[in-house]
Amino acid sequence: MASACDYCAKQVKDEEPFVKCMGFCEGVVHMRCTKTGSLKMNTSLLKIINECFNMFWMCDECSKLMKVARFRTVMESVGDAVDHMQDEQDRKNSELRDLITENGKQLLLLSKRVSSLTPTANKLGTPRNKPTPKRTRDSNPVPSKPLVFGTNEVASASVTCIPPEENLFRLYVTRFANHTTATQVEGLVKNAIGQNELVQVTALVKKGVDPLTLPFISFKVAVNLGHKAAILNPAIWPGNCGFREFEDLQRKSSSPSNGDGQRAKKPMLSLATIPITLTPSGSASPNPDNHDVEPFLTPRSGNSDGASAPMDH
């Protein structure tokens, strides 16, 4: 027993008889310290108190408190207040359970209503963000009024004009191997129309791009209009080469359009069938017998239009 006696303040040992206050303090007192006048607690009396639930022993202080009527009334009021608080708590808990049950029923009804509305909402469809329409070049611009040229042949030292442009026919040629040069293509064309004829060849490669990094390259070939039929002859072009009339999109001249208002794209002409070999001088000549020598052509693939080239016209 580790408690101290409330009367003598000495420790109460386990082998010593003691009595416990059944009042408010619940203190422990030596049995020998309970002597009051001629009355002293003994073992027989303690046994009777422990066996009879209607008999209590209290210390002197607790006995005094119980004799005060006001204190007894306060204790009774506290007990009533505790009972009232317990009843109120039970009532609030019951109301809370009822509210939770009611809210659950309302949520169930709401979910059923949303489910019934879902098919109708699906029929209406959800709005989609339409992509911004791609800006396209005007395919059929309004043609400008034609120029009227002067006829005065008198030369003027202060006012001069440039000579008129040569009337050239331009051809788009594609699917050349990436190591092919404009000089080689120029020699190929001159070999067909004449070495002294005007031939302008331009590689269609973006500025700053290494041609060797491309799968193939294309060229723009310009000759006098009188040689149009000659360079449109598939027999002068290598077997895997595709070509068509060149379309200069930078010019604002009007051109025929198809039914939907779009510019009518000229179809790629049939591929040529005669392989070409380069001569040591840089010109080209037909070689119909040797079909294995095609030094500046890339192998034919599914797209003969040159769509993967960097600059397609």
Image (cartoon, helix red, strand yellow):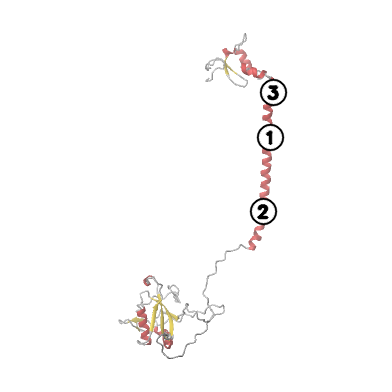
User: Are the two marked residues, 2 and 1, in contact with CB atoms closer than 8 angstroms?
Assistant: no
Left or right: 33 as drawn, with respect to 217:
right
Which quadrant of the view contains residue 97? Answer: top right
Marker disc for residue 306: none
Q: Pick whichever of labels 3 and 2 is earlier in the sequence.
A: 3
Which quadrant of the view contains residue 260? Answer: bottom right
All told, the count of numbered labels is 3
Identify the residue under disc 2: 112
Left or right: 11 as drawn, with respect to 172:
right
For the residue pair 285 and 80, the one nearer the viewer reads as 80
Mark 2 and mark 1: Cα distance apart in space? 37 Å
Q: Residue furthest top?
A: 38
Identify the residue under disc 1: 88
User: Are the two marked residues, 3 and 2, in contact with CB atoms closer than 8 angstroms?
Assistant: no
> Disc 2 residue type?
Lys
Which image quadrant: the C terminus? Answer: bottom left
Identify the residue under disc 3: 73
User: Are the two marked residues, 3 and 1, in contact with CB atoms closer than 8 angstroms?
Assistant: no
How packed mark 2 is, by other alpha carbons closer than 10 Å (few <14, some 14-19, many 20 or more), is few
Residue 74 in the image: x percent, y percent?
Answer: 68, 24
> Disc 1 residue type?
Glu
Is residue 142 depicted above or below 93 in this figure? below
For the residue pair 241 and 75, the one nearer the viewer reads as 75
Is residue 99 depicted above or below 47 in this figure? below
Any part of residue 56 in sight: no
